[in-house]
Image (cartoon, helix red, strand yellow):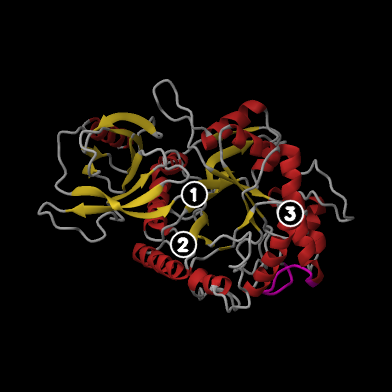
Amino acid sequence: MRLYLKFAVAMAVTAITAETVSADRYVVDTGSPRQSISHFGASDAWAFPRIGAWPDEQQEQIADWLFSLETDDKGNPLGIGLSLWRFNLGAGSYEQGDSSMIRWERRTECMLRPDGTWDYTKQMPQRHFLKLAKERGVPYFLAFLNSAPVQFTDNGLATNYGRGGSINLRDDCYDDFADYMAKSLKAIETHDGIRFNYISPVNEPDINWLDTLQEGSAATNREIGRLVKELDKALDRHRLSTEIIVMEVSNLKNLIGRNEHTPFAQGYALQQLFTPDSAAYIGNLRHVPGLIVGHSYWTNTPVTFMASLRRLIRQKCNSLGVGFWQSEYCIMDNDEEIGRGPKFDFTMTTALYVARLIHHDLVMADARSWSWWRGAGEDYKNGLLRIYSNDTKRTGWAVDSKLLWSLGNFSRFIRPGAVRHEIVRYDESGAIVADGDTEPYGIMCSAYRNTDGSWVVVAINYSEEVKPFHIEVPGMDGHKWTMYRTSDIASENLAKTGTVDRDTRLAPRSVSTFVMK
């Protein structure tokens, strides 16, 4: 049966030609620009303190897959061209060892010693990978923290064990924590030549972090506002132009309201951080752009709710003149449609599921940036790459996935500064189809114009059928689209599949990108 399925899919893809015209027309509305896209990214969390010390050959391959913009001799991309790399700035749980109460592979080093001196040899494997990213043209870097350094925390740990819903930071250490962040950025710029565009001082403060085995801290909006004000001053003192990104909530509901499962009185982050009469207001600080940042966990099922929540986020952000980033996502227990989080999935099942979420974040919420959680991970659906290590953990290898390449259908071709445009769908009678660019179990498509004038259309076919597809840009008649596809076919990993005009077909269970120069 499996061989027959592969043969049937191969025959269907082979049959995709420009001979059949779609009854419906997908037309890019060049007169309706939406948000500007800043970047697509992933993070170095947990795996890269090991990967960054592996032999060069393994590191170079991983860096190529994640960051390269080069192509092979057939025009196929060598990598997905991520344009943002998120660096996990450490809190010192590694130096505490088992007493940290954190799993060994999730501990982080800290350049600042408890006695106040600095050790600039810390986090070297991660910092090495920053250089590999820069060498491959990654233009943006972000440093994020899950905890303050342990010497500044209320319980002496980088996790919230034994505490409540307030920030795990001593009341007299807000300025010390801010100075640590600024000095760390300055040190990495001085020693490694990496300038950080962004710093994210808190991560998922709407979780209690009481019973986890990783770094983390809760925080109220007022505490975040106080910390950001100290960080803004520290960046000025150290003459850094780095922007402060807040607040990376775990649940998007807490941006504009309150998630019913949030264990303490938190939520309404957008209103409290960016309304001038709020005690937590930070919108007037020099290093704070008009951005609110959140994670898409727990808010993608059912699909009707996924769409409605994101439309509401767009509406609320627009009312305050604030942009939105989606900065972290991986598969969790609520993702029952694809078997939840355990067991890494190399197939299109997870790839399509995530592509659908990316589409909704970009099209419904006007997300200006989109990032996956881990660049590489183990036997769980949280890495773009699946890594394997030997017993010493000093070397290993990575295997790519359809998830990696389908993210590349967006990140490789939609470059920083691209502007999204609406797509209007017309049925056979010429009538406009409401929300015609989004069929959650059929075709979903979105359009972008890069700063070099090129047009990019990403089309997802979630179904198991070949779908006719007609795409046009007014005034661009006669121009050809170059097509790149990720599908169930083993060799189709962001593969260049030729050129087409306005009419083609979409392979079943595929993500296709059309580029018009």
For marks 3 and 1, give the CA distance. Answer: 23 Å
Which residue is denoted by mark 2 in the rendering? 334
**For residue 167, what is the image quadrant?**
bottom right
Label 3 crowding class (10 Å Cα cut-off): few <14, some 14-19, many 20+?
Answer: many
The residue lying furthest to the right in this view is 115
Question: Residue 266 placed where, x, y %?
Answer: 58, 75
Q: Residues within 10 Å of mark 1 (few under 14, many from 20)?
A: some
Residue 514 in view (yes/no): yes
Relative depth, front residue between 164 and 127: 127
Which circle marks residue 38 in the picture?
Answer: 1
Residue type of the residue flagged with mark 3: Ala
The residue at the point 61 percent across, 36 percent down is 134
Q: How many marks?
A: 3
Viewer-nearest residue: 133 or 398:
133
Earlier-in-chain disc, 3 versus 1: 1
Amino acid marked by disc 1: Ser
**Residue 157 at least partly seen:** no
The residue depicted at 48 percent of the width and 60 percent of the height is 324
The answer to if 496 sits in the magenta stretch is no
Residue 207 % position (x, y) = 61, 68
Label 1 residue SS: loop
Residue 161: horizontal and vertical position, in percent? 73, 67
Most foreground residue, 405 or 388: 405
Range of magenta residues: 161-171
Task: Please state which of the two labelled residues, at mark 2 or mark 3, is closer to the viewer.
Answer: 3
Residue that sits furthest to the left in the current view? 429
Q: Which residue is mark 3?
A: 182
- Please, what is the dominant secondary structure of the magenta stretch? loop
